[in-house]
């Protein structure tokens, strides 16, 4: 076989591989006109090579951000250096559908894109090769793992029964607000709340009914706070509410509003309708508090006084 024939065969093989390799290959000139459009691009875009060739890439895909991509293509030619675009920067350049199994999570194909300069024999660069990699599996697996980690992190902070924050989250938030007060001052209130005679509810109606009561009360507490406030289940039937930038009189007004809502609740179980009340103990952050537990202790003292005075009431801490 002659050298020319071998060269032609190698060229044929090379062209066949370029056409059928499992990545997208696009060659653009310095006017962004398409010179090569392989079968990967045909199959996923629905645009044949005969139609795509000689057209501007931006007329074939008008939704591509032309200013952004033109700048990158111009830099590849001017600087004679490659540029890599990760799916984490931009999930996809071309809006191709994801042809994955039915269980696939992505509607669109995630893509990594490499922009490489093509050097002519005379050393000039007037063309750019775009290599488009389908990384949908890698991207969706990473996003699934990230979503799972975020969900686990969220669940680790929440009380599973009431869907309020758990004790660990309360302690962390309490320290944060206390540190803010210690450095900047201001008026911040801490409330401890307790469902009155909750043990009798469990004894009379059973623990499943007690869980319904906890959930109903928690729903009222959660829906009554502002975005800047914080409420969590501290343990059993006891709750903590943090009211930043709220003095004791404002906290008292809030607690009385919530107390009345809870007293009006009619909690339906399978066989009964249950009503409960709550008691609230309030204290405002003080310079005399050395640690967050001091502040919490004063709210607990106020709650103890509310319960001692007959329950179903709100009491602001007082040294007297």
Image: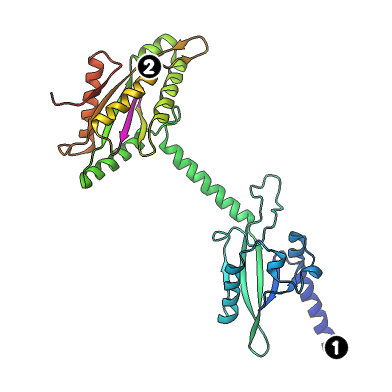
Q: Is 97 in front, or is 221? A: 221
* Quadrant of residue 275 within the rendered picture: top left
Q: Earlier in the sequence, mark 2 or mark 1?
A: 1
Residue at 31% across, 23% down: 256
Q: Residue at x 22, y 19 (%)?
A: 305
User: Left of 79 or right of it: where is 169?
Assistant: left
| Residue 143 relative to residue 154: left or right | right
**Image quarter (top left, top right, bottom left or bottom right) of the C terminus:** top left
Q: Which residues are magenta?
A: 235-244
Residue 205 position by quadrant: top left
Residue farthest to the bottom? 122
Which residue was labeled with disc 1?
Answer: 2
Q: Is residue 1 above or below residue 163?
A: below
* Residue 237 part of the magenta segment: yes
**Residue 161's spot in the image, x, y percent?**
45, 27
Would you name the residue on which mark 2 appears?
Answer: 263
Residue 173 in the image: state x and y as whole percent. Answer: 32, 39
Type of secondary structure dominating the magenta stretch: strand
Q: Residue furthest left?
A: 320
Q: Is residue 106 above or below residue 19?
A: above
Q: Is residue 207 above or below residue 107?
A: above
């Amino acid at each position: 076989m002659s050298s020319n024939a071998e060269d032609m065969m190698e060229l044929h093989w090379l062209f066949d591989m370029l056409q059928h390799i499992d990545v997208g290959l696009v060659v653009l000139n310095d006017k962004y006109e398409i010179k090569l459009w392989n079968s990967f691009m045909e199959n996923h875009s629905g645009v044949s090579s005969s139609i795509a060739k000689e057209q501007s890439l931006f007329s074939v895909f008008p939704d591509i951000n032309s200013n952004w991509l033109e700048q990158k293509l111009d830099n590849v030619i001017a600087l004679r250096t490659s540029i890599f675009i990760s799916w984490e920067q931009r999930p996809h350049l071309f809006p191709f559908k994801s042809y994955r199994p039915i269980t696939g999570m992505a509607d669109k194909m995630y893509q990594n894109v490499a922009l490489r300069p093509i050097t002519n024999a005379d050393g000039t660069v007037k063309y750019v090769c775009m290599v488009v990699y389908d990384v949908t599996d890698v991207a969706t697996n990473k996003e699934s793992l990230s979503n799972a980690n975020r969900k686990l992190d969220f669940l680790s902070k929440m009380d599973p029964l009431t869907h309020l924050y758990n004790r660990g989250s309360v302690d962390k938030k309490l320290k944060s607000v206390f540190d803010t007060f210690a450095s900047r001052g201001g008026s911040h209130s801490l409330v401890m709340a307790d469902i009155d005679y909750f043990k009798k509810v469990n004894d009379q109606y059973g623990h499943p009914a007690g869980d319904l009561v906890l959930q109903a009360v928690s729903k009222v507490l959660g829906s009554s706070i502002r975005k800047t406030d914080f409420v969590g289940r501290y343990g059993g039937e006891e709750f903590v509410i943090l009211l930043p930038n709220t003095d004791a009189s404002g906290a008292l007004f809030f607690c009385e509003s919530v107390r009345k809502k809870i007293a009006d609740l009619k909690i339906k179980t399978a066989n009964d309708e249950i009503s409960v009340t709550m008691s609230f103990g309030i204290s405002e952050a003080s310079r005399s508090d050395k640690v967050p537990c001091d502040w919490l202790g004063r709210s607990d003292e106020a709650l103890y006084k509310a319960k001692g005075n007959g329950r179903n009431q709100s009491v602001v801490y007082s040294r007297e």
